[in-house]
Amino acid sequence: MNLYKTDRQARAVFTVTRHPEGWAVEHEGELLDPCRTQEEARAAATRRARACQDGGRLAQINMQGERGFFTERVKTPA
C-alpha cells in the first residue's frame, strides 16, 4: 500500500455562507445555489457533495461560523 501525499485525492469543499440576498453554497471561490434560508443552502450543499462522492471524489461541507461540536467537561467531585 502506497500512502504518499501525491496519491491522496483532493477533497471538494462546499461552504454554506451568507450573501446579500440570504445564503449560498461557496465552492472554489464561486457562489452557487443562492437560497433564502440556511436550511435550503445546506440541502443544496449536500446535493453537490453527494454528486461529487458519486463521481468518486471526496467531499466536505462546512458551515460559515461553525467550528465543530464541543462538549463541556464534567467535573467529578474529588
Image (cartoon, rainbow, N blue to C red):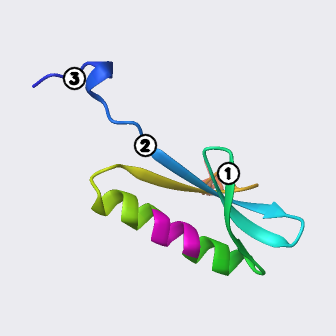
Magenta segment, principal secondary structure? helix
Residue type at mark 3 is Leu
At horizontal 22% and vertical 23% (from top left) the residue drawn is: 3
Q: Residue furthest right?
A: 20
Return the residue nearer the eye: 29 or 4: 29
Dot 2 and dot 1 residues touching (CB under 8 Å): no
Residue on which disc 2 sits: 11
In the image, which is nearer the foreground, mark 3 or mark 1?
1
The secondary structure type at the circle numbered 3 is loop
Give, as a single range, the part of the protein colored magenta: 44-48
- Residue appearing at x 48%, y 53% in the figure: 60
| Residues at marks 3 and 2, CA–CA distance in whole angstroms | 16 Å
Q: Earlier in the sequence, mark 3 or mark 2?
A: 3
Q: Label 3, on which residue?
A: 3
Give percent across and percent down for residue 56. Answer: 27, 52
- Mark 2 vs mark 1: give the one in front: 1
Mark 3 vs 1, N-terminal side: 3
**In the rendering, which numbered label is found on residue 30?**
1
